Image (cartoon, helix red, strand yellow):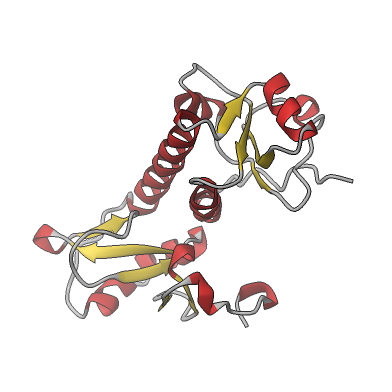
Amino acid sequence: MGRGGASKDRSDGAERKCIATGEVQPKHGLIRFVVGPDAQIVPDIAGKLPGRGIYVAADRDALEKAVAKKLFARGAKMPVQVSDGLVAEVERQLARRVVDLIALSRKSGRAVAGYEKVKTWLQNEEAQVLIQAVDGSGRGKSKLSTPHYGSYIGWLTADELGLAFGRQTVIHGALASGGLTQRVVEEANRLRGVRENDGGNGRREG
């Protein structure tokens, strides 16, 4: 059983053990780190840097514990340097990754922004994911519901969503199924675990 009583699903791919919680889980729920030059711990958000991976759950408490208790040195089996701003840097890189993936989805025609466009996609059952800015008006956001059996992302800022959609700010966005959508959801869930204000769950349909 995984966290929250969920069954472990081996189809999620390779699993790794978190150095802070001791739990084994699919890699898409973890943050990979490697030992870089000068024995510095470097976050590897994309999971592509060379070297032996050290894994921490995508959870702010777990990351802070790994830093405070010097668990990276144990995981690396050698003395390492850990920057004071490591957790903040992980959050920054995750947010950037989510923004970039949404931008790619927009360019492929699988993402739209703006209240009316999102509303139309929801009504036509084209939307798989509802995205709303954490700093948007609660009243305005409550008028749109998460798609049935869909996902909600509500912990990016209006400025971050603006970057994703090529605008100054964006409050409402939506993703169609297929393409990069599953990756966006996975990366956004990692960000949610690391970000202190996770934005809640959104209004469920029905």
Residue furthest top as drawn: 168
Instruction: Give the residue drawn at x 16%, y 60%.
Output: 36
Is 203 left or right of 109, judged from the image as shown?
Answer: right
Q: Tell me the quarter of the picture where residue 78 sits.
A: bottom left
Q: Position of residue 109 (x, y in %)?
A: 52, 30
Is 9 left or right of 74, judged from the image as shown?
Answer: right
Asked whether 181 or 57 is in front, the reply is: 181
Q: Position of residue 83 (x, y in %)?
A: 26, 54
144 in relation to 177, above or below = above
Asked whether 199 or 115 is in front, the reply is: 115
Number of numbered markers: 0
Asked whether 197 or 104 is in front, the reply is: 104
Residue furthest left as drawn: 38
Asked whether 20 or 162 is in front, the reply is: 162
117 in relation to 193, above or below = above
Is 45 left or right of 183, judged from the image as shown?
Answer: left
Q: Position of residue 173 (x, y in %)?
A: 62, 30
111 in relation to 115, above or below = below
Instruction: Give the residue drawn at x 69%, y 37%.
Output: 126
Instruction: Give the residue drawn at x 75%, y 44%.
Output: 147
Quarter of the figure with the N terminus: bottom right
Instruction: Give the residue drawn at x 58%, y 23%.
Output: 170
